[in-house]
Amino acid sequence: MNKERLMTVLIQPHVSEKASTITEKSNQYVFRVRSDASKSEVKQAVELMFEVKVEGINLLNKPGKTRKFKNVAGKRNGYKKAYVRLQAGQTIDLGGGAAS
């Protein structure tokens, strides 16, 4: 895999209440990924960027919602999420800030 391509696979961590409970209970992290990313690309990208060992990946396509505003129909963009399960004893620090 091309290293430049792997650096663009992960877009951002997906922060939600469900994602934080999954992280606490089952050592899984949720990321938004490129819509054309595969499981093997996501695995290699996480291992490259965070230097951890990945046990498994689940991908999810979230379709965009249709909305109306003043009787004009529109559609929001969809996105792709990756649920990344790490091996036992591995963690990712998504906070990034230093504690004072």
Image (tube, grey):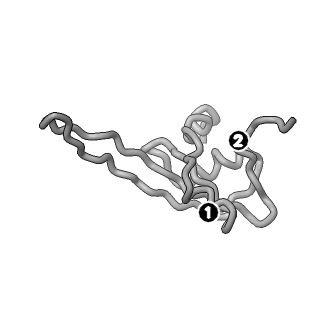
Instruction: Decide if residue 21 is in sight here.
Output: yes
- Quarter of the image where the N terminus is located: top right
**Residue 73: image location, x then y, percent:** 16, 38
Instruction: Decide if residue 41 is in sight here.
Output: no
Return the residue found at the far right.
100
Q: Say if 3 sits above or below 88 in the image.
A: above
Q: Residue at x 69, y 62 (%)?
A: 24
Left or right: residue 37 versus residue 54 is left
Contact flag, marks 1 and 2 (Cβ < 8 Å): no
Q: Say if 97 sits above or below 36 in the image.
A: above
Of the pair 74 and 38, the residue shown nearer to us: 74
**Residue 68: image location, x then y, percent:** 19, 40
* Mark identifier at residue 22: 1
| First-in-chain label (1 vs 2) | 1
* Mark identifier at residue 97: none
Of the pair 17 and 43, the residue shown nearer to us: 17
The amino acid marked with disc number 2 is: Met
**Residue 46: image location, x then y, percent:** 66, 48
Question: Could you give the CA–CA distance between mark 1 and mark 2, rounded to whole angstroms?
Answer: 21 Å
User: What kind of element bears circle 2?
Assistant: helix
Q: What residue is shown with label 2? A: 49
The amino acid marked with disc number 1 is: Ile
Q: Residue at x 29, y 47 (%)?
A: 65
Q: Residue at x 77, y 47 (%)?
A: 51
Q: Say if 40 sits above or below 24 in the image.
A: above
Q: Say if 88 sits above or below 15 in the image.
A: below
